[in-house]
Image (cartoon, rainbow, N blue to C red):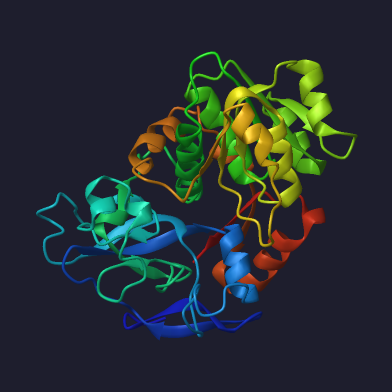
Amino acid sequence: MSQETMEALVVLEPNKLEIQQIPVPHPGPNEVRCRVRAVSICGTDAHIIRGDYPGFWPPAFPFTPGHEWAGEIDELGENAAALGWKIGDRVCGTSHNACGVCQKCVEGRYNLCENYGKAGLHKQYGHNSQGVDATYAVHNVKCVFPLPDSVPFDQGAVIDPASIALHVARRGNIQPGDSVVITGAGAVGLLAADAALICGAARVIVAGRGYRLEKAAQLGFETIDTTAGDPVAALKARVPLGADVVLECAGVPETIEWALAMLRRGGRCAVVGIPTEKVSLAIQPLVLDELELVGCRATAGEMRRVIEFVANGKMRVGELITHHFPLREYQQAIDTFNDRSSGAMKIIVEP
């Protein structure tokens, strides 16, 4: 590989992948270029590669996915040094490069940028703008965060989903002493369980199935096996009045119904799982029990906060990393990710 070109994963069309030599990018104003050391595969990556969001994520093929990553800065764009960055800084990245000037951005809710997807105003790396499954990546300085020396690059690549988990817990408005249920024992669900403890939950119960639920038990959480009968009844047998908060991290119509049914009166459900089909909800209990149902999109300022919890071990991202692959074996990595029998939780790709 020369200084002018680099390896990159290129999705030529849905389900057709290739490792190509492409030009090395250079940073513009307020940008840095980073040598990518680790990329974590996200469920969204699998959807993008399958072509599940045609014309949206990505706007067009060919496309390079990837948005959960860590590495080190190797080139500074204009203003980057003035903003405190230097070559050699270890960083982790997040995807939303929002406009910064719309009302939602000004209010700190840049994940809801009102200029989302508009050329020249907004990018979401690895979604509607080229991603980081490559040797080098250029990001706006808004989207990179200092990675402590004590946190290895593979764990740094899982800080973005950890920040999403913390966002979900904060949207759940968890109060000290609350009983919290997590529906869905995937990576975000288990990170959300840690986030619930960070936010003060006294009791965290994870509802799921298979090896992922076994992992939840290994991490010390109470568990409900959703294949062993009615999970709502199982929850009510332990917490008769229902949970104060449910964090819905599965995105399946059935789990969203369970989540609302598990709440005590006046309870709150924060939903981050995105169903691919319509969901029917019973509105009567929502009204009569004054339940709260809130959505959670990505992260809104939690990156810098969650880094400290990863560094001190309260957010246990390292426990969820199950596989490592070099970039040139990406096809095997994504096949392993999609194979429920593989035992995969978080898969790290190393360019």
The answer to whether 30 is drawn above or below residue 55 in the figure is above
Res 266 → quadrant: top right
Q: What residue lies at 52% left-to-right and 31% top-to-bottom? A: 195
Marks counted in the figure total 0
Q: Position of residue 326 (x, y in %)?
A: 57, 65
The answer to whether 262 is drawn above or below residue 131 in the figure is above
Is 202 placed left or right of 96 in the picture? right
Q: Nearer the viewer, residue 1 or 294?
A: 294
Q: Position of residue 33 (x, y in %)?
A: 28, 66
Q: What residue lies at 55% left-to-right and 20% top-to-bottom? A: 201
Q: Position of residue 18 (x, y in %)?
A: 58, 83
Res 2 → quadrant: bottom left
Q: What residue lies at 77% left-to-right and 60% top-to-bottom? A: 339
| Residue lying farthest to the right in this orientation | 228
Q: Quadrant of the N terminus?
A: bottom left
Can residue 234 be seen at all in this image of the molecule?
yes
Is 272 placed left or right of 142 in the picture? right
Q: Position of residue 289 (x, y in %)?
A: 62, 26
Q: Nearer the viewer, residue 27 or 128?
A: 128
Q: What residue lies at 63% left-to-right and 81% top-to-bottom? A: 14
The answer to whether 107 is drawn above or below residue 172 in the figure is below
Is 11 placed left or right of 257 in the picture? left
Can residue 88 be seen at all in this image of the molecule?
no
The answer to whether 176 is drawn above or below residue 341 in the figure is above
Q: Nearer the viewer, residue 150 or 262?
A: 262
Is 264 placed left or right of 81 in the picture? right
